[in-house]
Image (spheres, rainbow, N blue to C red):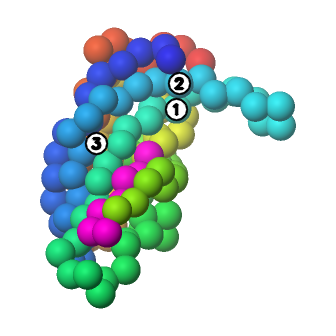
Amino acid sequence: MLCQGDAQGSGSLGGYAISAKDAALIRLPATKYSPSEQEIQATVTVSHWQLWTDHLELSAVPCTWTDPGGASGTVSCHPTRSGLLSKNWILRLEAPTPGYRWFTVTLGRPGDQCTLEITLDEEVPPA
């Protein structure tokens, strides 16, 4: 872990409620098969109120991040755990811009989207 911060925000996407109210962090994950590249991680919860409704698969929803300078990038979504009416996801902001502390994450398409904010305690360090 290189730095931490927090993720905030809530909204709806279709009939699902999305909320982020937990820690965010910058990691430099390294695996045997891929080079290490900085990423920001934050957890979100997607919930619904109808027992017969399937969980929303965030991995199928367009997700992007934007920094105050106007740069943007891809957000990948990975499931962690689910309950009867909710499912938690880790959002991974790929290759965040060095020098910034604040990022906006947009999930969905215009007309049906949710926006979350990530604020870090320190700027993203150079790669």
Magenta stretch prevailing secondary structure: strand
**As displayed, is residue 67 above or below residue 119?**
below
CA–CA distance between discs 2 and 3? Answer: 18 Å
The earlier-in-sequence mark between 2 and 3 is 2
Q: What residue type is disc 3 on? A: Thr
In reply to whether residue 126 is colored magenta, the answer given is no
Crowding at mark 2 (Cα within 10 Å: few <14, some 14-19, many 20+): some
Which one is nearer the viewer's eye here, 4 or 71?
Answer: 4
Q: Which residue is mark 3?
A: 104
CA–CA distance between discs 3 and 1? Answer: 14 Å
Q: What residue type is disc 2 on? A: Arg
Crowding at mark 3 (Cα within 10 Å: few <14, some 14-19, many 20+): some
Q: Which residue is mark 2?
A: 27
Is disc 3 placed on a helix, strand or loop? strand
Q: What residue type is disc 1 on? A: Glu
- The answer to whether 113 appears left or right of 40 in the picture is left
CA–CA distance between discs 1 and 2? Answer: 5 Å
Q: Measuring 30% from the left and 83% from the top, which residue is drawn there?
A: 53
Residue 118 lies, in percent from the top left, at 28, 34
Crowding at mark 1 (Cα within 10 Å: few <14, some 14-19, many 20+): many
Q: Quadrant of residue 32?
A: top right
Which one is nearer the viewer's eye here, 39 or 65?
Answer: 39
Q: Are marks 3 and 1 in contact (CB under 8 Å)?
A: no
Q: Are marks 1 and 2 in contact (CB under 8 Å)?
A: yes
In the image, which residues are magenta? 84-90
